[in-house]
Image: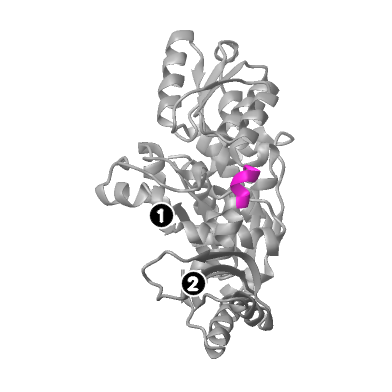
Amino acid sequence: MVTGAEVASAAELLRGVVRRTPLENSRALADRVGGPVLLKCENLQRTGSFKIRGAYTRIARLTDAERARGVVAASAGNHAQGVALAARELGAEATVFMPDTAPLPKLAATRGYGATVRLGGLSLVEPLLSAAAFAEETGSVFIHPFDHPDVVAGQGTVGLEVLEQCPDVATVVVCTGGGGLVSGVAAAVKDARPGVRVVAVQAEGAAAFPGSLARGRPVALESMSTMADGIAVAAPTDLTLAHVAGLVDEVRTVTEEDLSRALLFCLERAKLVVEPAGVAAVAAVLADPGAFPAPVVAIVSGGNIDPVLMLKVVQHGMAAAGRYLSLRVSVPDRPGSLAGLLQACAAVSANVLSIEHQRTTTRLAVGEVEVAAVLETQGPDHAADVVAALARAGYAPTAD
């Protein structure tokens, strides 16, 4: 188990290397929780995530001979960038294996920090195997993303900063994949303030900790499905499972809708660009604000998001937040029917995003046409008003 003293030692090592990221108040979240809520903005860290903390700590503590052999890592993006930058700062050559599906901005950034990138595989499984084989063949030191005490201690420096920036914190909420960040944060926080609640948050479609905790050993998920690739880890390790079992008060899960809604919330209300994995803690607070005693600190762990994915997630978040309304309406197949429907929508300030005619479905009577419309609304209440107004106008809208 990593101790608070080891995290403090890592903090000294990282002084002048990593940024002391800001802690930003969120009034919108505070209104929901009923007390102060602050966001620890590791999306503003060097490389765009907390990963530089653990990677630098691990590589800095290698011997000169080990660093001379080079380092190797496997990552979908954030750990890759942390290892690449840390290796460059410490004068070591870095080789990083990444899946073919790795987002282009993360690939470009990793190469930009000086690492040699090798692609292969549709998930992280193949890059991990390739990195292990490369280490065996070349003598390079494998830098695991979370399964090493130095990595855990480095990530734990986030928790030390939280305690310094918010001394009266009652709950720390942490995005969790393999568990390196939450293990380190819990080690730091519980050593100094045992009464502070530490909550780990996983994506529902990639939640390995609940099953592993129940069985008392790491148990790999048979499959994973989540937009939050940064926390899509099939199993914890003995090291991180021990920390979570011994120090973390609760493990919660969030849905894809929770994640997309939280990402949109961070963009609109906090003015923060956050990737789906990095927004899991905020998603948990939004989904169940009464479950977190205040003051609450939610760690926003990363902001490296592909713009194409951002567009898709924002659209998903708009739908999850009730800002998009998809309807089907049957109208007479004669001139003016569509215009009348659009006028009814305009009368209640519903903005039409797309519209489509359908004449060949068995749901229609002879002489009818079905109109499928996607409308932009001001939220769930406005969406309900739109449906009610269309019904009063003589239409029979059904949700799509």
| Rendered location of residue 170, percent (x, y) | 55, 65
Is residue 108 positioned above or below 319 on the image?
A: above
Is residue 351 positioned above or below 101 on the image?
A: below
Q: Amino acid at mark 2?
A: Val
> Extreme left residue here?
215
- Front residue of 63/336: it is 336
Q: What residue lies at 65% left-to-right and 59% top-to-bottom?
A: 266
Q: What residue lies at 64% left-to-right and 69% top-to-bottom?
A: 352
302 left or right of 251? right
Is residue 47 positioned above or below 120 on the image?
A: below
User: Helix, strand or loop at disc 2?
Assistant: strand
Point out the frontmost of discs 2 and 1.
2
Q: Are marks 2 and 1 in contact (CB under 8 Å)?
A: no
- Label 1 sits on residue: 204
Classify 10 Å Cα crowding around label 2: few (below 14), some (14-19), many (20 and above).
Answer: many
- Label 2 sits on residue: 369
Q: Amino acid at mark 1?
A: Glu
Predominant secondary structure in magenta? helix
Q: What residue lies at 46% left-to-right and 15% top-to-bottom?
A: 135
| Rendered location of residue 324, percent (x, y) | 58, 68
In magenta, the rendered stretch is 306-311
Which image quadrant for residue 71? top right
